[in-house]
Image (tube, rainbow, N blue to C red):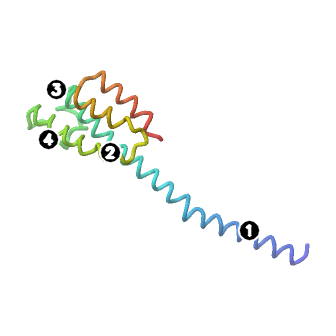
Amino acid sequence: MSIDNVISIVISILGSSLITLILSTFIFQPMQEKKKYIFDEKKRVYESIIVFAQIVLFPAEAKFSLGVARYNIQELSDDENRNNAINDLKMAIPKLKLISKDDGLTKEVEKFIQQQNEKQFNVLVMRLRKDLYK
């Protein structure tokens, strides 16, 4: 094996490592960070939907739920709790429009806010499951 072949092999190894590093730094890592950010934001929005559902569908049980602790639910009336949860959920709808690829999802959320029943919640959950990992 001549010195030219060894140099050629070393250059190709270093070159491929450099290209891999550049691709990883400027393309793959930002894409992963974007996906993680979108996933985390979806989780926050979905949590608002779940808390709203807990308060609306199961108000007696919600008073003892850890998921609704931030609403100070045990001290407020059911109407105040419902209004707080509705406001929180309505604030999450614009964020949902930005991060979701499912255009009809926000309509389902608004429909659930209007109807506030378990059947519509189940429809919404099925839609959310499909959207979470897109």
Q: Which of marks 1 and 4 is nearer the N terminus?
A: 1
Q: Mark 2 points at which residue?
A: 44
For the point 16% across and 40% down, which residue is it?
Answer: 84
Q: What residue type is labelled 1?
A: Ile
Q: Position of 94 compared to 78: left or right? A: right
Q: Earlier in the sequence, mark 2 or mark 1?
A: 1
Q: Earlier in the sequence, mark 3 or mark 1?
A: 1
Q: Is mark 2 on a helix, strand or loop?
A: helix
Q: How many marks overall?
A: 4
Q: What residue type is labelled 2?
A: Arg
Q: Mark 1 points at which residue?
A: 13
Q: Position of 5 compared to 85: left or right? A: right
Q: In which quarter of the image is residue 16?
A: bottom right
Question: Percent x, y for residue 81?
Answer: 14, 36
Q: Quadrant of residue 49?
A: top left
Q: What residue type is labelled 3?
A: Ala
Q: What element carries label 4?
A: loop
Q: How crowded is mark 1: few (under 14 residues within 10 Å), some or many (20 or more)?
A: few
Mark number displayed over residue 60 = 3
Q: Position of 29 compared to 16: left or right? A: left
Mark number displayed over residue 72 = 4
Q: Residues within 10 Å of mark 3 (few under 14, many from 20)?
A: few
Q: Residues within 10 Å of mark 2 (few under 14, many from 20)?
A: some
Q: Which amino acid does label 4 sit on?
A: Asn
Real-space Cα separation, disc 2 to disc 3, in angstroms = 24 Å
For the point 30% across and 27% down, which residue is it?
Answer: 121
Circle nearer the viewer, 4 or 2: 2
Q: Which of marks 4 and 3 is nearer the N terminus?
A: 3
State whether residue 59 is above or below residue 100: above
For the point 39% across and 47% down, which residue is it?
Answer: 99
| Pointer 4 with pointer 3, Cβ within 8 A | no
